[in-house]
Amino acid sequence: MSQLIKTPDDIEGMRVAGRLAAEVLDMIGPYVKPGVSTGELDRICHDYIVNVQKAIPAPLNYKGFPKSICTSVNHVVCHGIPSETKILKEGDIINIDITVIKNGYFGDTSKMYVAGKASILAERLIRVTQECLYKSLAVVKPGCRLGDIGHAIQKHAEANRFSVVRDFCGHGIGKVFHEDPQILHYGQPGTGMELQAGMTFTIEPMINAGSYHTKVLPDGWTAVTKDHKLSAQWEHTLLVTPTGVEVLTARSEEDLSFLGA
Ligand code: MF3
Ligand code: CO
Ligand code: CO
C-alpha cells in the first residue's frame, strides 16, 4: 500500500535505504573509466548491494528489467540496460541509477560520471542538470506546489538553451518503488498539488542538449534522444520536512549547505 504522508518509522526506514543507495554511487565511482563495460559496473553494484549492504537491487526483474542498475550513456536518456559489450570510451558520459530495497523501503538516486575527460558541452550539460536538481530542491517545503518544482527546473534548463524531457518524471516512493504523486520536471508556478511535511518523492530531471523528444528502443527499456544529442540526469529521494527538505540520498562529497540547516 502506498501512502502520501509517511510515519516516523517509515521515515527512519527511508533514511536507511536512501543512505545505502547513495553509498553505492560513491563506491562505483572509481570503476567508471574508459575500457570498463556497463555489465561489469552492474555486477560490481549488484554484489555490493547484496553481499555488503544485505539489501535488494530494486531494478532486477522489476517489470522484466534484466539487470540490477540502469546505465545510460551519452544520448541514452534513462533505463539503459547494462551489457558486457557496451564498453565505455574516453569522453563518454554515463548516468548510473541505483535503487535499493532495505527492510521493505526504497531509496532511489542517480548521478553523472565521465569516463576520462568530457567535451565542454557535455561538462556544461552535466553541471546545468545538477543545478536544475538543486534549484528544485531549494523550493521544496510545505505549502509549495508541484508546479513550482517543475518550473524551477524548466527555467534553468531553458535559460541555458537545453530542453526538459517530458516522457519520464519523478515519483512518490516509500514501500513502493513508484507511487503517487508524479513529479513533472516542467510546469507553471503556483499549480499542482500542495506539498505537506512527511511526503517522500524523487526529483530526477533529464535534460537534453537538443530537443526533448525521446523514443524507446526495441528492447522495451532504453530511452534515447530522438536527435541522438546528449542527455544528462541527476536524481535524489527527498523528504518534505516542516521547514523545507531533507535529502535522503545525499552523498558525502555533496555540498547541500545551500538548503540551510
Ligand atoms: N530508478 C529508476 C527511477 O528513477 C527506475 C528504473 S526502473 C528499471 O525511477 F526497471 F528500469 F530499473
Ligand atoms: Co526514480
Ligand atoms: Co532512479
Image (cartoon, rainbow, N blue to C red):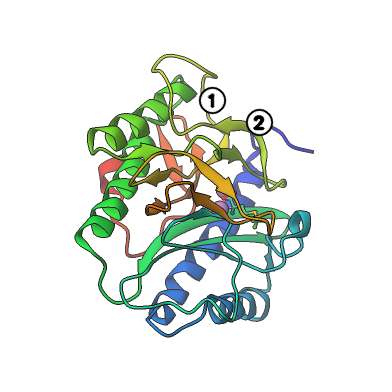
Q: Residues within 10 Å of mark 2 (few under 14, many from 20)?
A: some
Can residue 260 be seen from the camera position used here?
Answer: no
Query: Tag 1, which secondary structure?
Result: loop
Q: Nearer the viewer, residue 3 or 152?
A: 152
Can residue 136 be seen from the camera position used here?
Answer: yes
Mark nearer the N terminus (2 vs 1): 2
Q: Nearer the viewer, residue 180 or 67?
A: 67
Q: Residue 95 appears in which quarter of the rendering?
A: bottom left
Residue furthest left in the image: 120
Question: Residue at 35% of width from left, 75% of height from top?
Answer: 115
Q: Position of residue 184 (x, y in %)?
A: 51, 31
Question: Residue at 39% of width from left, 44% of height from top?
Answer: 207
64 left or right of 86? right
Question: Relative to 199, does residue 178 appear above or below in the rendering?
Answer: below
Residue 4's disc is 2
What's under tag 2, amino acid-wise? Leu
Q: Residues within 10 Å of mark 1 (few under 14, many from 20)?
A: many
- Residue receiving disc 1: 196
Question: Residue at 74% of width from left, 57% of height from top?
Answer: 62
Question: Relative to 79, does residue 40 appear above or below in the rendering?
Answer: below
Q: Position of residue 40 (x, y in %)?
A: 56, 82
Q: CA distance from mark 2 to mark 1?
A: 9 Å
Q: Position of residue 16 (x, y in %)?
A: 58, 58
Q: Residue 92 appears in which quarter of the rendering?
A: bottom left
Query: Tag 2, which secondary structure?
Result: loop
What's under tag 1, amino acid-wise? Gln
Residue furthest bottom in the image: 35
Residue furthest top in the image: 190
Question: Residue at 62% of width from left, 73% of height from top?
Answer: 49
Q: Nearer the viewer, residue 192 or 13?
A: 192
